[in-house]
Each structure stands twice: as C-alpha cells, then as structure tokens.
C-alpha cells in the first residue's frame, strides 16, 4: 500500500510509445517511485461513456481494483484515461450503492479507494518545480513552446484540480522549470476534435488547423502536449490538415515529458523523437546550439558590464580621495585598470576647477 | 408533424437529474454553450436548441439528431454554462439513451464506438490498427486515413500481431453484462 501505480493505457503502448517511455524516464530521473498497474485493460475512453454509463464505470473500476492490489494512487498520463478513471473513482466513493452496482458487472469486487492523478499533478506534487530545475543540464531557453492542454487536462476543474478552466497553468510551470521559453496564447484549452476525429474528419481538420495557426501566431516553434490524441491530431494528421487547406504547416509537436527529458540531458533517441511525423530533431538541435551561443554572448556582456562597473568604482574612489583633500597621487590611482580612468579623472578635475 | 412528448420529457429530465445531476429545465437560453461549441458548425441543431427541445419534449428529433452524435465531449459548454448545467454530460447521456433504445442515428460516430468497444471486449486492450481497419469496412470508407498507414508502420506506431491481454475475458463479460442491463424498458 501507499504506492503510486502507473496506468499506461492503450495509446501509450503503440501509437504514443514515446509518451510512455519519456514519462517513465522523467519520473525515474525525478526519483518518483511507481509500479505498473498489474494486468490493466482498456478504460473504454471515449466510446464506452458514450455508449453506456455502467459499461464506462465498470471498465474503469476494473483498473482501479487492479491498482488497489499494489498501491493507493494511480497516475494515468493520457488525460482521456485519467478522466474516465477519476470519474469512476469519485462516483464510487460518493455513492456506496453505485459501488455495489458496478461490482455486479465485475468478476471480483472493487473495495479499495484509489486516488487517480494527472501526470502534471504527479510531477508537481511528488517532485515539484524546484526539483525539476535542479536536474536541468541542457539549456532549452531557445526552444519557444506553447503549452497545449486540450480539453481534458483543464476541464472540468472539479476533476483536474486546476484553478481556472480557461487558463490552466500546470504545464506552463513544468515547461518553465525545464528552462524552455513558454509563449503566451489563448488556445491552451481549445479542442483539437479528437473524439470524432475518425467519424467526422472536417471537425478535426478545422479545429487542429486553428491550434497550429495560433501556435505560430504566438511566436512558438513547437507545441507541447500531454495527450496522445492531441499529439496524433496535430502531428500525424498535420499532413491531412495541409491537404485539406492547401497549407504548409510543419510544426513539431512534443510531449511535455520529452521537453523535460531533453532538459535533463536525455538524447533524441532516448526521447524517441524519430517517431514523430513532423521531425522535431532539427528544431531541438538548433535550439540547443542557439542556447549555447546565447549564453556565451550573455557571459561576454556580463563580463563587459562588470569591467565597466569596476572602472566606475575605481573612478569614484579616486574622486572621493581627492575630495577628502588628499594630494592626487598617480601611484595610488594605479589601481585603476584602464586608460578610461585617467580620462574621467581629467574630466572631473575640469569640473572641479569650474565649480 | 412535431410531437411534443411532455411525459417523455419529464421522464428524461428525472433521468438527467439522477444520472448526470443536471437539470434541463434550468436552461434560460443564453446561448453560451452554442457560442463556445467548436463542433457546432457540423450540427443540425445548436446545443442551446437541443436544450430547448428537451424542455418541450421533442425527444425523437433530439435522439436522431446529428448534434448528439457529433458532440466532441470537450466540455467547453459545461464549463461556461452560467446555470452550471453539465450540458456535455447531457449530450453524453443522450448518446447512451439512443444506444439503449436502438435509435437509428446519423453519422458514423456510433459505428466507431461499437467497433472500438467490440475490439476492446475481445482483446482487453485496444488494438488500434485492427480497430481502424474494421471501422473503415463497417463505415464503408475503406480508404479512410489510408495515407497515414505508411508513417504509422514505419514509425513503429502499430501493433502488427494483436494479442489478448490477461484481463480480456473479464472485459468481455463487463461489456456484455452492462449492455444487457442497459436495454431500455418502457
């Protein structure tokens, strides 16, 4: 008991394997201990809850029961899996009668009380912004990203724990802690059209195009997501958006855990960047290179600034000594390092004479 | 001719009150749900119209509407409703009522859901490629998303030989028992 369990879900096994691997590596690096839910099965999202309520809660409750055998908390990185299992958790906790109804469709009853958490919640609660910052080894300051929460990480706030449904902040905080440059935008929680993505393509095409368009408008080079369906719609289906609108988007879509992993020094291969349809590797390499150049330039400017400060300080001391009525001495003034100091001194002498 | 089924409307309202904890009678037609709905451009009725139709008892029209089928469950309407009505919850429940009553519905969303769940009931975990192929056959769009096949294969994003998960049999039983119970009485 007392352990955090990990529910990967169906998407993370194959189509979003990079989300699974990067999440596991990041949790490991942050020292967050977890164990996979034994013999987990599909949570049914999203067809189950649009077909039958008891079916949806039954599929989710089976996973809660499996998790309860090894722990009392469950993280589901996929927000869709999270919502289903959280919804079942709350309804079963609140209504003992409903627990009984659900148990009637399960082989073995679920008697535990497992708390379901989002991935950002786990990262912020069990590790935190400071711990993430301490582990950053690769500078991503030149990686300009927008955090895309999609529908289910922020809504409804009663489920997700975000303070504001329209302006959630958990991903912003994670990405900033990783050192990336987070651009402000208004499309954090707009829908990408996932749940009817296959049956009604035109919804997906229009909504996902808006997301890409707004990301570029906000000055971002990439979109950071935390949902396998958002990723599929924005990355794999970007080619379909271009075909539908005659556009030429080529926007890399990164999982938030891939950004964290890169900041922690994991390689492109370890973060499985090659699995994306829009290859993010050139952008990542460029951002890392630019960051090095940027920091060198920053260091150069800082040392110049420091030298100027020293000169000013020396000149100030020089003036102070002379005001104190001591004979100006070139031997003492020798502490001043540059020729600018005598020039300033000469200027001061003129001013003093004029005064 | 439009049939106003006030008795049915009252019955459905009670169901929504207990199941979704949302009261359709609370809607005062501000239209916020429709203004924020990202998918409404494909609907036959806007979300606020569906709410009104539920109030007056146009149940057959509601259950057979494309609006109910094409709702993307993004929850924007729910989060912006000034009357705190869980509108997305109502739409979700309307879909389940249409399934339970075996209503003929437009669009392919219900077909997608059925193919998806039958796959899960068989394998325990979704085997994405199998599900997509079967959906294309069932919805009679065999080449739907065909252009994604190559990148999905070369990027190692599909499971070529699906296996049954350990809990698959129980999942199959959950599926059958739930749908048996769900069948609409009366």
Image: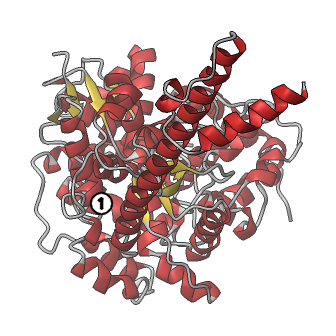
Image x and y of residue B104, in percent: 57, 67
Element carrying mark 1: loop
Q: Nearer the viewer, residue A36 or A142?
A: A142
The C terminus of chain A - image quarter: top right
Mark 1, other Cα within 10 Å: few <14 / some 14–19 / many ≥20: many
Which residue position holds label 1? A16
Picture quadrant of residue A96: top left
Residue B128 screen position, x and y as percent: 28, 67
- Viewer-proximal residue among B11 and B52: B52
Quadrant of the snapshot with the N terminus of chain A: top left
Q: Horizontal placement of B10 versus A338: left or right?
A: right
Picture coordinates of residue A104 (x, y %)? Answer: 28, 29
How are the colours assigned in the image?
Answer: secondary structure
Residue B172 is left or right of residue A115, and the answer is left
Is residue A152 visible to us here? no
Q: Residue at x 63, y 53 (%)?
A: A190
Vertical placement of residue A207 versus A120, above or below: below
The correct choice, above or below, for A176 with respect to A326 in the image is below
Residue at 81 percent of width and 41 percent of height: B55
Q: Chain of mark 1?
A: A
Q: Nearer the viewer, residue A127 or B138?
A: A127
Q: State how many labels appear.
A: 1
Q: Where is residue A303 shown, x and y percent of the image?
A: 47, 43
Q: Residue at x 41, y 74 (%)?
A: A236
């Amino acid at each position: 008991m007392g352990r955090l369990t990990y529910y990967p879900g169906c998407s993370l096994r194959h189509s979003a394997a990079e989300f699974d691997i990067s999440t596991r590596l990041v949790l490991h690096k942050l020292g967050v201990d977890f164990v996979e839910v034994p013999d987990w099965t599909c949570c049914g999202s999203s067809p189950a809850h649009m077909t039958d309520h008891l079916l949806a809660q039954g599929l989710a409750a089976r996973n809660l029961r499996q998790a309860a055998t090894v722990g009392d908390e469950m993280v589901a990185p996929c927000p869709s899996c999270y919502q289903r299992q959280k919804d079942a958790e709350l309804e079963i906790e609140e209504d003992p009668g409903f627990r009984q109804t659900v148990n009637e469709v399960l082989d073995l009853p679920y008697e535990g009380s497992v708390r379901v958490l989002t991935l950002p919640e786990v990262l912020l609660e069990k590790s935190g912004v400071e711990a993430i910052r301490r582990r950053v080894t690769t500078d991503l300051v030149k990686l300009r990203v927008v955090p895309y929460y999609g529908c289910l990480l922020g809504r409804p706030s009663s489920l997700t724990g975000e303070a504001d449904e329209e302006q959630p902040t958990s991903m912003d905080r994670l990405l900033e802690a990783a050192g990336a440059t987070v651009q402000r935008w208004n499309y954090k929680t707009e829908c990408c059209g996932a749940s009817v993505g296959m049956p009604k393509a035109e919804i997906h095409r229009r909504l996902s195009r808006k997301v890409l368009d707004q990301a570029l408008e906000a000055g971002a080079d990439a979109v950071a997501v935390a949902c396998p369906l958002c990723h599929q719609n924005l990355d794999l289906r970007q080619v379909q958006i271009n075909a539908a609108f005659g556009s030429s988007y080529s926007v890399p879509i990164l999982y938030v855990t891939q950004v964290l992993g890169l900041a922690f020094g994991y390689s492109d291969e370890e973060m499985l960047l090659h699995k994306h349809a829009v290859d993010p590797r050139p952008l990542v390499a460029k951002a890392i290179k630019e960051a090095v150049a940027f920091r060198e330039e920053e260091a150069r400017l800082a040392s110049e600034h420091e030298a100027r400060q020293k000169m000013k300080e020396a000149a100030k001391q020089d003036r102070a000594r002379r005001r104190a009525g001591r004979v100006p001495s070139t031997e003492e003034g020798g502490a001043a390092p540059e020729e600018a100091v005598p020039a300033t001194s000469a200027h001061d002498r003129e001013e003093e004479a004029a005064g | 001719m439009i049939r106003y089924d006030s008795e049915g409307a009252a019955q459905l309202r009670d169901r929504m009150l207990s199941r979704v904890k949302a009261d359709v009678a609370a809607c005062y037609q501000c239209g916020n749900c429709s203004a924020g709905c990202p998918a409404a451009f494909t609907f036959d009725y806007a979300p606020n119209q569906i709410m009104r139709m539920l109030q007056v008892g146009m149940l057959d029209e509601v259950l057979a509407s494309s609006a109910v089928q094409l709702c993307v469950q993004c929850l924007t309407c729910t989060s912006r409703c000034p009357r705190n009505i869980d509108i997305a919850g109502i739409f979700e429940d309307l879909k389940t009522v249409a399934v339970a009553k075996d209503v003929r519905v437009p669009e392919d969303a219900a077909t997608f859901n059925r193919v998806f769940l039958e796959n899960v009931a068989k394998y325990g975990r979704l085997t994405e490629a199998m599900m997509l192929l079967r959906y294309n056959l069932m919805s009679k769009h065999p080449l739907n998303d065909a252009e994604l096949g190559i990148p999905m294969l070369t990027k190692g994003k599909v499971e070529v030989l699906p296996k049954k998960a350990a809990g698959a049999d129980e999942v199959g039983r959950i599926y059958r028992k739930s749908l048996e119970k769900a069948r609409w009485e009366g």
